[in-house]
């Protein structure tokens, strides 16, 4: 496996881990762990797709990363008690 394969694989595994942990009730979809796993994972997978010049996954992972970034910004802007 080359660097692009590793980036894409690790990125996708992070997204799947976030999903799995959410499904089994270990993390909430509003938790920082869930948001960061998706944001970092989608960003890595998107970057790997850019390196491969594979447009369908550039779009998919790019949108996934942007939605996760939006969630991260919302998380940071909420007042802390």
Image: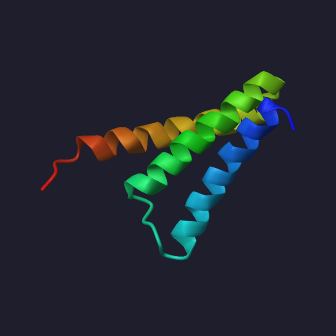
Residue 64 visible in the shown view: no
Residue at image position (75%, 36%) is 57
Front one among 49 and 55: 49
Front one among 14 and 1: 1
Query: In the current view of this chain or complex, which residue is farthest to the right?
Result: 1
- Residue 54 x %, y %: 82, 29
Query: In the current view of this chain or complex, which residue is farthest to the left?
Result: 81
Front one among 51 and 4: 4
Residue at image position (52%, 42%) is 39
- Residue 5 x %, y %: 81, 37
Picture quadrant where residue 58 is located: top right
- Residue 29 x %, y %: 45, 60
**Image vertical order of residue 61 relative to residue 17, above or below:** above
Residue at image position (22%, 47%) is 78
**Image vertical order of residue 30 relative to residue 11, above or below:** below
Q: Quadrant of the C terminus?
A: bottom left
**Image mark count:** 0
Picture quadrant where residue 44 is located: top right
Q: Tell whether 56 sits left or right of 20.
A: right
């Amino acid at each position: 496996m080359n660097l692009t394969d590793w980036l894409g694989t690790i990125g996708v595994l992070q997204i799947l881990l976030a999903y799995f942990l959410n499904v089994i009730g270990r993390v909430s979809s509003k938790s920082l762990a869930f948001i960061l796993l998706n944001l970092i994972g989608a960003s890595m997978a998107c970057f790997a797709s850019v390196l491969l010049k594979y447009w369908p996954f550039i779009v998919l992972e790019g949108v996934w990363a942007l939605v996760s970034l939006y969630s991260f910004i919302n998380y940071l802007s909420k007042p802390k008690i």
